[in-house]
Image (cartoon, helix red, strand yellow):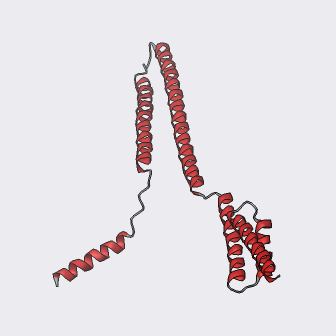
Amino acid sequence: MKEDKIIDVLQEADQTAGTLAPVSANLADSVRRRARKRHFRNIAAPVAATAMMLIALGIWQLPTEPGRKQEQERIVALEARLQQLQARTDTTLKLIREVLENERRQHRLEELEAKLASIPDPLKEIQEQIDKTAFILCYQADRMYREFNQKDSAVKTYNRVVELFPHSGSAEVAKQRLAEIQNDSVSNNGSRI
């Protein structure tokens, strides 16, 4: 009874969990990319926070009366420093985006190259079909000549093989068969005289 309940609970958990997402073949690459993103984010955030604290500190320490001009100059210097930090941060983020985009493009290129490599050569497939067709015609001509004694049809078919597929192995076989038929005809005509 307890086992049935346990089995029911496990099956229900499996159903609610659904199927697991497939594990990517390039899991290591994606983990590295995510780690780089986090690393650069962790760099950019403290820089921005430091700049904001410097501005807040500068505003907080503004003098009320004397030395106001000096404090304003300090604020201007802090704002200039903040702009420099912001420019650095923007440049760093731009560089990070470019690196990530280049990695994505490289990964896509590798995928496409692998896909292209897996596609069979169409010329090779066509040549295989041509050879197969020549073989079938030659085989049919052999049957016409040997099994059905249809010499004229066999000769026509052998000639078609030689004409249509001159560079195939079946064309060589067809030439041999034509020579055999011609020799048989000459020997049969010579023996009848």
Measured as percent of width and height from the top left, residue 116 is found at 60, 53
Quadrant of the snapshot with the C terminus: bottom right
Counting labels gives: 0
Q: Depth check: give the residue in front, 17 or 172.
A: 172
In the rendered structure, the answer to whether residue 93 lies left or right of residue 193 reads left
The answer to whether residue 72 is above or below residue 143 is above
Quadrant of the snapshot with the N terminus: bottom left
In the rendered structure, the answer to whether residue 73 lies left or right of residue 135 reads left
Outermost residue, front direction?
Answer: 193
Measured as percent of width and height from the top left, residue 174 is found at 72, 69
The residue that appears at 77% across and 76% down in the rendered structure is 187
The answer to whether residue 22 is above or below residue 105 is below
Measured as percent of width and height from the top left, residue 58 is found at 43, 23
Measured as percent of width and height from the top left, residue 179 is found at 75, 69
In the rendered structure, the answer to whether residue 105 lies left or right of residue 49 reads right
Outermost residue, right direction?
Answer: 193
Q: Depth check: give the residue in front, 180 or 6.
A: 180
Outermost residue, left direction?
Answer: 2
Q: Depth check: give the residue in front, 174 or 188.
A: 188
Q: Depth check: give the residue in front, 170 or 68.
A: 170
Identify the image quadrant of residue 94.
top right
The residue that appears at 55% across and 37% down in the rendered structure is 98
In the rendered structure, the answer to whether residue 130 lies left or right of residue 155 reads left
Outermost residue, bottom direction?
Answer: 148
The answer to whether residue 122 is above or below residue 154 is above
